Image: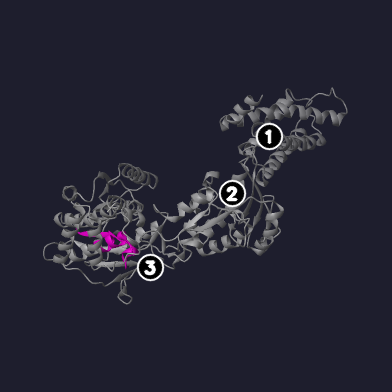
Amino acid sequence: MKSFIASLVIASRWIKLCGLMLLDFLVFPILLWVCYALRLLDLSADLVPNLYLGEFWISLFAVACLFVCSVYHFVIRTFNETLIVRLFIATIMTVIGLLLLGHFSDVFIPASVAFMFGFMMFLWVWLSRSAIRLTVRYILNPRVTSKRIAIYGAGIGGQQVVQTLLRSDEHLPLFFIDDDKNLRNRRVGGLKIYSAKAALDALERYEIDEILIALPSISRARKNEIVEFLSQSHRRIMELPSLTKLVDGQINISDIKEVDIVDLLGREPVDPVPELFSKNIQGKVVMVTGAGGSIGSELCRQIIRNQPNTLLLFEISEYALYAIEQDLRNIIREESLPETKILPLLGNVQNKQRLVEIMKAFNVETLYHAAAYKHVPMVEYNVVEGVQNNIFGTYNTAKAAIEANVDSFVLISTDKAVRPTNVMGTTKRIAELCLQALAQEQGKTHHTLFSMVRFGNVLGSSGSVIPLFKKQIAHGGPITVTDKRIIRYFMTIPEAAQLVIQAGAMAKGGDVFILDMGEPVKIVDLARNLVKLSGLTIKDESNPDGDIEIRFTGLRPGEKLYEELLIGGDNVEQTYHERIMTAKEDFLSPDKLKELIKQLEDACNHNDCERVRHLLLNAPTGYHPVSELADFVWNKQHSDD
């Protein structure tokens, strides 16, 4: 029996629809017989006297009315006001049809029979669907426990979400929360609407498991306020998908997701300046190194939407290269973009000959250099590799660009290059110095415009604290934070990529562009907010029975409490774009740069980490290490000395 019911449940929608129509068609004659028996007080009374096969035709007419009113198109698990209205209309149509048939023909259909049949028809459809729903739920899914949901927002979005949740046995929407005073204490879709203040008590009374924010067009500032308010209830907070899906009516259970801390930290987006956004891309041959990385891949997504002639993806990781290529092709297909040549190219930025051959073969016009090691402790543990990739890789790519007559070269830099306390930041500062030195020769030996864009942490990138914190919360904690005082600037990956593209379009040669990162964020506050969004509490001295502990582990090698974007405090100027500034900083002469590169190459070839560190300290970078030399191989080799 259970397997038979299961086979019906997984059957196609049309099979279910036909099955329900057949069921109603077979039951309606029985209901009609009951109506005549009650009216005539005779169990053997003829059905629909004076009409051959009358019960057949009336049953067919009633089913047709239900079909025309789209009653059969509703999912069995959904029983809402809309369905009730349509069922009522279908019932009225059936009753009127019976009355007209009895009035304008010799067919004996008393008014009482017509009204009784209408009542029984309505009751049958209501009860039969409820019985089917309960059968499916309690026989096939006896152990499923529905999550009790409160929905913030009683508008169109909230109402659509209720319909979506009602199709699932695992979700039970119980009430709305809305800020509109005119809606308070009213009902929508059978659910009561509470004010935000009254909802706090209702959350406890209804034993709500999750709160779903159904306000897809809300501003980040307002969403922050709502999340902050709801977090005191210690419930998991979810949100509705994009406004586009809402308009299209395509909301699915899988679209509903946890409120993303990235959205809360990010700022309201600023539309790109069209002439800046397309200047170095549209109709051009564009190359991105490190195309499979966090920033590199987002640059590629933004570039492909600007319709380049050709996009070259240069990446050392085969897997990352394949992933970004497939992603870009999906974007072109899903967004109906013009076809663009996308060429996945494996290679290492330390191989200058490979770079030259690629750039010359395809006549590259614009190059974004995103290939780099950026994880601070990782580079501290692998000093020589960090220098070779971040310094030599940048220098080789820049020299190759000059040799191939590339028009524009943009380096993706970091705020860790300012007064660096670690090897990674120092290598990125020397990478900047490489471009600044080469820029001094522009117009004399080459025409390539070099520029660099410096910004802080991007949310959700590889190595970001957010995925780590989420994983730690999922495992029950503790969350590990290096220091309670540590602060960082954050920016979303799409915003960073857009600003990088626009900054590069304003380059004049040797420019250092600084992105406006907004307000800094305390990492410990970020951790606390993630715990709240999960519906959990912080375990500390004031709340020893809390869920998640925050444990402070101490600063890692090369890490500092705060980052800066400017080397000098008063050397910054505003540009054409409100979130992009330019800084005037000291250059390193081409001769001195070549000497530094030569010495670093010699030290790296001998894996002399101590000498590499000495050269970095003496370079004009402002490098002030906060930890001892931490290279694993070097320390192992000299552990017995």
What amino acid does circle 3 point to? Asp
The outermost residue toward the front is: 641
Q: Image point 25% across, 54% down: which residue?
A: 384
Residue nearest the viewer, comparing 571 with 465: 465
* Mark 1, residue position: 138
* Mark 2, residue position: 161
Q: Image point 44% across, 60% down: which residue?
A: 554
Residue nearest the viewer, comparing 457 with 514: 457
Q: Work out whether 243 lies above or below 592.
A: above
Query: Left or right: 323 with respect to 49?
Result: left
Query: Left or right: 79 with respect to 429?
Result: right
Numbered disc in front, either 2 or 3: 3
Q: Position of residue 618 (x, y in %)?
A: 23, 67
Which quarter of the rendering shows the C terminus? bottom left
**Residues under numbered marks 2 and 3 in contact, where contact means CB atoms less than 8 Å apart:** no
Q: CA distance from mark 3 to mark 1?
A: 56 Å
What amino acid does circle 2 point to? Val
The outermost residue toward the right is: 41
Q: Which residues are magenta?
A: 406-430
Residue 480: say if magenta: no
| Colour convention | one colour
* First along the sequence among labels 3 and 1: 1
* First along the sequence among labels 2 and 3: 2
* First along the sequence among labels 2 and 1: 1
